[in-house]
Image: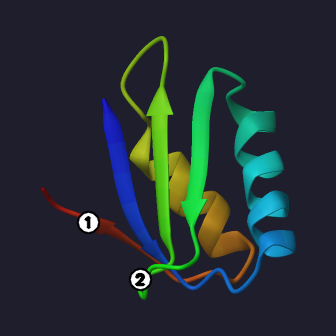
Amino acid sequence: MVEVYKTSVQDHIQAKVVKQLLLAQNPSLEINFDLEDCDRILRIKNIEDAVDISSVLKVLHETGIYVEVLQD
């Protein structure tokens, strides 16, 4: 299952930091950003299980990044 988020990530450096923080928590995640999109999209797929949305939101909020879950 893929979860999609709107974020305030501004550049590839910030995206890399967020990716490292999320992977430190759960190395089975597949993470990518679409910074060209106006919503600065973050897509997360968990290879083994469902994505723990609350932990993703917590990590991003702790780093001062706005995040919003996008519905299908």
Label 2 element class: loop
The vertical placement of 36 against 60, above or below, is below
Three-letter amino acid code of the residue under disc 2: Asp
Residue at the far front: name it. 36
Quarter of the image where one finds residue 14 = bottom right
Question: Residue drawn 87% across and 71% down?
Answer: 13
Q: Which is more toward the observer, 55 or 35? A: 35
Residue 42 in percent (x, y) is at 50, 61
Q: Which is more toward the observer, 40 or 66? A: 40
Q: Do the residues labelled 2 and 1 touch (CB within 8 Å)?
A: yes
The vertical placement of 70 against 11, above or below, is above
Three-letter amino acid code of the residue under disc 1: Leu
Residue 65 in percent (x, y) is at 63, 80
Quarter of the image where one finds residue 59 = bottom right
Q: Which mark is residue 39?
A: 2
The vertical placement of 24 against 46, above or below, is below
Q: Earlier in the sequence, mark 2 or mark 1?
A: 2
Question: Residue drawn 74% across and 37% down?
Answer: 23
Residue 33 in percent (x, y) is at 58, 60
Q: Distance between the residues labelled 2 and 1?
A: 10 Å
Q: Which of marks 2 and 1 is in front?
A: 2
Question: Residue drawn 54% across and 52% down?
Answer: 56
Q: Which mark is residue 70?
A: 1
Is residue 37 left or right of 25 when viewed as pictured? left
